[in-house]
Image (spheres, rainbow, N blue to C red):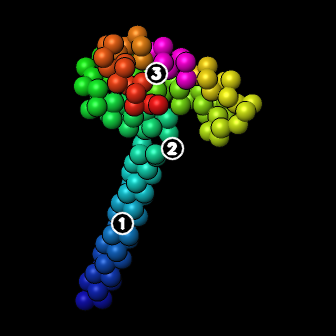
Amino acid sequence: MVTLVTLNLKTKKMRNLLTVFAFAATMLFGIQTASAQQLSEDSTRPEVIAKTETAKLTETLDLTGDQSRTIFRALVAKEVAYRKNNLTTDTNSNSVEKKQIDNQLKDAMKKTLTAEQYAKWVKMNN
C-alpha cells in the first residue's frame, strides 16, 4: 500500500513537471511568433512604407504587376536613401541630396509608367 501511494505521488509530480514544461514551451513559441509578426509589420520599415505606397498607386493608377514590382523597388530605394542620408527632416543642407533622390524616383516612374499614368502621378505628388 505504501509503495502504491509513493508511486502515485511520483506520477503526480512527473505529470505536473511535464505540464509546466509544456506551458513554458508554448509561451516561448508564442513570444517568438509575436515578435516576428511585429518585425514584419513595423510601419517605419522602408519595405512597409513602399508596400503601402505601391498599393495606393496600383489602385489609383491601375498598374500592371510588372509596373507595381518596379515601382515598389524604386520606392524602397528612395526610402533607404532617405534613411541613409538622414533626410527625414527637411533642412536646407539636405535639400540637394533630397532633390537628387526625388529625381531618381521621377526617372524610374517616367520609365515605368505610361504617359497618362505619369501625368496623373505628377499631379498627385504636387
The x, y position of residue 81, in whole percent, is 59, 27
Label 1 – label 2 distance at C-alpha = 34 Å
Give the extent of the magenta segment.
Answer: 102-108
Residue 36 seen in the figure: no
The x, y position of residue 1, in whole percent, is 25, 89
Q: Nearer the viewer, residue 55 or 123?
A: 123
Residue wearing tag 1: 23
Residue wearing tag 2: 44
Which residue reaches farthest bottom? 1
Dot 2: within a 10 Å radius of its alpha carbon, few (fewer than 14), some, or many (20 or more) residues? Answer: few
Residue wearing tag 3: 74
Above-or-below relation of 22 to 6:
above
Tell me the amino acid under the disc marked 2.
Thr
On the picture, is 65 further left or further right than 43? left
Name the secondary structure under disc 1.
helix
Name the secondary structure under disc 2.
loop
Check residue 105 for magenta coloring.
Answer: yes
